[in-house]
Image (cartoon, rainbow, N blue to C red):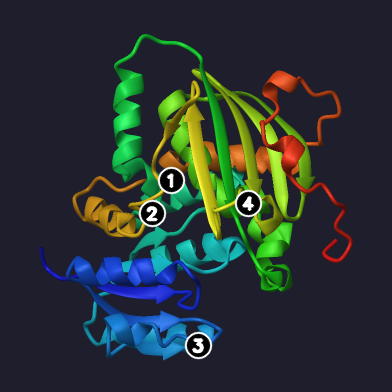
Amino acid sequence: MKSKNFILIGVAGYIVPRHLKAIKETGNNLIAALDPSDSVGILDKYFDNVDFFTEFERFDRNVEKLKRSGNKIDFVTICSPNYLHDSHIRFALRIGANAICEKPLVLNERNLDLLADLEKEYGKKIYTILQLRLHPSIVQLKKDVDSSPKKKYDIDLTYITRRGNWYFSSWKARKALSGGIATNIGIHFFDMLTWIFGKVIKQEVYFSNPKKMVGYLELENANVRWLLSIDKKDLPKGHSPTYRSITIDDKKIEFSTGFTDLHTEVYKNIFAGKGFTVEDARQSIKIVGEIRNLEVTKSIDNNNLHPLFSKIDKSKIYKYW
């Protein structure tokens, strides 16, 4: 495969090394990058001749110069804050490039329709990173479910990962900019569950504050009790800094390892014409959008309540409201 030219928007984020690694390991070139922060020395680990900018206007001008000097831009990788994804995807299409965007593609489902129209208008593609669909344990789970007689599975989803006080000074803590906890740390799990167990029938939220959420999701073929938290107080003993668990009919699915190389596999799929599309992203974006706007349910069916609900810290948070 002939090497492709990439530019990257949002270089200082924690997920960026996986994208840099994917671009490098698939034999492609990164020729320009943008981030308001200049703390992006990570670039040197992968590429040593990247034009870098902290201002979009100068970055945009550089992109035009690259194009006019014969340097075709094939892909724009987007790792900017969630609320900017929509705009940066449209920028990629306007300059004649395909977009590879981190989750979520957009914060609200309604914005996906315009992006789908723009794909057709510009003749380019928008791809997203739904890496759990490529995790060997999850792929095997889907095969098992697809080959089994239809039934309603009982699932407990638990994801607890600690975040320090920096989180609450960043855009991530502002629901209008990030989408909140469910979008920030839960969207790839919701995507995986609907990919395997079907469409949403019912949703409820039982607890919600800026650090954690607890709820229930009924799918076509599963009842899902879920708990998401960035509060270190909720971590079980021996599981620091992260605890992730999915149990299906009381059987635990092991997928605690194997995450770091999945972005490279996503990129390989894109180049093979099998990347994850706008429509692939729709269901999970719809789920987290609805969760964001649901009122907390006061009347709770205990059968639908996550088993760790009684153990999490439910202290009121004043500092960050």
Are dots 1 and 2 in contact, CB under 8 Å? yes
Front position among marks 3 and 2 = 3
Residue at 31%, 35% in the rendered image: 139
The single residue placed furthest to the left in the displayed view is 1
Q: CA distance from mark 1 to mark 2?
A: 7 Å
Type of amino acid under label 3: Ser
Q: Position of residue 200 (x, y in %)?
A: 57, 26
Q: CA distance from mark 1 to mark 3?
A: 31 Å
Q: Earlier in the sequence, mark 3 or mark 4?
A: 3
Q: Nearer the viewer, residue 13 or 82?
A: 13
Q: CA distance from mark 4 to mark 1?
A: 34 Å
Query: Where is the N terminus found, in terms of image quarters?
Result: bottom left
Q: CA distance from mark 3 to mark 2?
A: 28 Å
Query: Is residue 67 visible to us here?
Result: no
Query: Where is the C terminus found, in terms of image quarters?
Result: bottom right
Q: Nearer the viewer, residue 158 or 251?
A: 251
Residue holding disc 1: 278
Residue at 62%, 35% in the rendered image: 226
- Using the image, tell me which numbered label, if any, was put on residue 126: 2
Q: Earlier in the sequence, mark 1 or mark 3?
A: 3
- Using the image, tell me which numbered label, if any, was put on residue 235: 4
Are dots 4 and 2 in contact, CB under 8 Å? no
Q: Residues within 10 Å of mark 2 (few under 14, many from 20)?
A: many
Q: Position of residue 305 (x, y in %)?
A: 70, 27
Element under disc 2: strand
Front position among marks 4 and 2 = 4
Total number of numbered discs in the rendering: 4
Give the vertical position of 43 relative to 268 (above or below).
Answer: below
Residue holding disc 3: 39
